[in-house]
C-alpha cells in the first residue's frame, strides 16, 4: 500500500458516486410510480361517483316514473353523498323522461377548478 498514490483518491470518489446516483435514480422511479398510481385511483374514484349518480337517477326513474330534476333530490331521497371539496357534479336535466347528463369534475387541492 502506497500512501502517496493519488489515483486511489479519485477512484474512491467514483466508487462512492455511483451508488449515490443509483440510489437517487431508484427513488425517482419509485416516486414516479406512486404518482401514476395516485392519478389512476383519482380517475377511477370520479368515474365511480358518476356511475353512482346515474344508477340513482335510473333507480328513481324505475320507482317513481321520472328522472329527478336536481342532484339535491338524489342526495335527499336516494342517499348520494360525495366530498364537495374534491368534486363538482354537473347534473343537467333534459326532460322528466330523458336520462340527465351527468359529469363529475375533480377539483384541485385548494378547492378550485383545474
Image (spheres, rainbow, N blue to C red):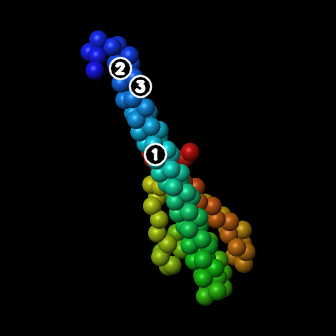
- Looking at the rendered structure, the secondary structure element under dot 2 is helix
CB within 8 Å, label 2 to label 3: no
Residue linked to disc 1: 31
Indicate which label's residue lies in the foreground, 3 or 1. Answer: 3
Most foreground residue, 63 or 4? 4
Q: Position of residue 1 (x, y in %)?
A: 28, 20
Most foreground residue, 14 or 3? 3
Vertical comparison of 60 with 91: above or below: below
Task: Specify the quadrant that holds the C terminus.
Answer: top right
Indicate which label's residue lies in the foreground, 2 or 1. Answer: 2
Which residue occupies 47% across, 76% down? 79
Residue linked to disc 2: 8
Q: Looking at the rendered structure, which numbered label has been put on residue 14?
A: 3
Cα separation, mark 2 vs mark 1, equals 35 Å
Mark found first going from the N terminus, 2 or 3:
2
Cα separation, mark 2 vs mark 3, equals 10 Å
Which residue occupies 60% across, 77% down? 55
Q: Residue 93's image quarter? A: bottom right
- Looking at the rendered structure, the secondary structure element under dot 1 is helix
Vertical comparison of 62 with 44: above or below: below
Most foreground residue, 69 or 54? 54
Amino acid at each position: 500500500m502506497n500512501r502517496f498514490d493519488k489515483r486511489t483518491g479519485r477512484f474512491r470518489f467514483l466508487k462512492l458516486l455511483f451508488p449515490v446516483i443509483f440510489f437517487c435514480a431508484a427513488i425517482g422511479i419509485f416516486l414516479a410510480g406512486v404518482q401514476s398510481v395516485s392519478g389512476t385511483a383519482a380517475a377511477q374514484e370520479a368515474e365511480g361517483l358518476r356511475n353512482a349518480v346515474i344508477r340513482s337517477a335510473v333507480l328513481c326513474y324505475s320507482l317513481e316514473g321520472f328522472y329527478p330534476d336536481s342532484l339535491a333530490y338524489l342526495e335527499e331521497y336516494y342517499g348520494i353523498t360525495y366530498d364537495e371539496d374534491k368534486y363538482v357534479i354537473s347534473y343537467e336535466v333534459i326532460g322528466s323522461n330523458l336520462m340527465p347528463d351527468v359529469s363529475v369534475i375533480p377539483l384541485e387541492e385548494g378547492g378550485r377548478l383545474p
